[in-house]
Amino acid sequence: MSYIAVTLNHFRALQEWAISQQAEVRLDMKTFRVEVLRGAARCNLHPQFLNTVDGSLRYSPVLSPAATGFIGWLPYRPISWALSNDKLEFKGFFRRSGLLTPKLWTSLGNVEEDYVLKQPVGSFGQAVFGPYHAGVDALSLPEHCNQVRERAFAEQFIAGRNVKAWFWGGEPFYLHLHSYPTVRGDGASRIDALIARRMERIDGAIPDSADKQWIISSLAFQGRALSDILPRDVEVWIDYRYGRRYASDPIQTHPDNMQHLLTENGREQVRQAGRYLHNELVKSHGVPVLFALDGVLDADDRIWWLEANSNPILPPTGYPLILATLFETGDIPKSGELRSPSAVVGTV
């Protein structure tokens, strides 16, 4: 399990900061809200949970029976902004700045390159389908009859490594760089058996989960099927979405920040994107907010930006950055009540 998703890593990060700053941290077990006190100043941190409802993932500030994960505390309740809600608006905004985004087509009859089918609204990789080769009419495929709503669009499929970067105050502080999950042939096993082996399935079968359709689509794009026997040492990828590993991971208690894996050119592309979006967000929020950007790093060291997330999971290493902003600012509101993201620190 990734470092950022381990709940106790969030507790450890707050504990370490409190000890180093001689601060007091209080957890309200009824609301899971955290109050942080340092000297005469205080702030409230609000929890965010990940809910699973009818197979779909959603954010919630409340620990409900549907909660399946904890994604951190922030000095404001969940917020929303247009550029994170609509992928088309985000891409238009970045394109106008000169930042790289994939080509778009609103009519599949005009698609000139390999593509994925997307919906403007949706998170967690649940509103993207494919990939497909140019000339394939994805909307006519049976699996899309009840899934794809109006406003579906085609987006150029950029193959590469998935980039997810987290920002506070427009500055990147954490990054994941993931290759696609793959299986390698042994000359005797079917692809579905190789995938089940990768997933450490005792029954030797791929579960009929919501992710299976992406496995099938990814293989079809490469001219393969689950029933194919993969030749020895031939490798195929089985998904292209961020966060899908199809393997059990040991629980990580040490940060898995991968910023160092980027070239200086790649790091500058990340910084440029973060500054550009932060400068837009500060117009409406007035203060730094946490956000994440998803992209793809291609073989030519170019990052193609896909979407923004206004309420991402907070990597625990971000707590010192956020708390430094709250407690070291010269303009501390006199009320500790949360009115907006800018009104989060008060005097005791």
Image: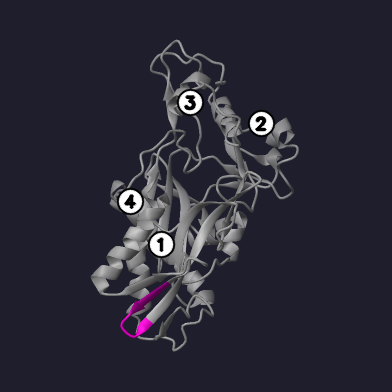
Q: Residue 123 at what x, y percent from top left?
A: 58, 51
Most extreme residue toward the top is: 188
Residue nearest the viewer, comparing 208 with 331: 208
User: Is 36 situated above or below 235?
Assistant: below
Say whether disc 1 or disc 3 marks the residue closer to the N-terminus. Answer: 1
| Magenta stretch in the rendered image | 35-41
Note whether residue 141 is visible.
no
Q: CA distance from mark 2 to mark 4?
A: 38 Å
Instruction: Tell me the amino acid under the disc marked 3.
Output: Arg
Whether residues under marks 1 and 3 lie with C-beta atoms below 8 angstroms apart, the answer is no
Which callout, 1 or 3, points to the residue nearer the camera?
3
Q: Which residue is mark 3?
A: 201
Which callout, 4 or 3, points to the residue nearer the camera?
3
Say whether disc 4 or disc 3 marks the residue closer to the N-terminus. Answer: 3
Q: Which residue is mark 1?
A: 167
Secondary structure found at label 4: loop
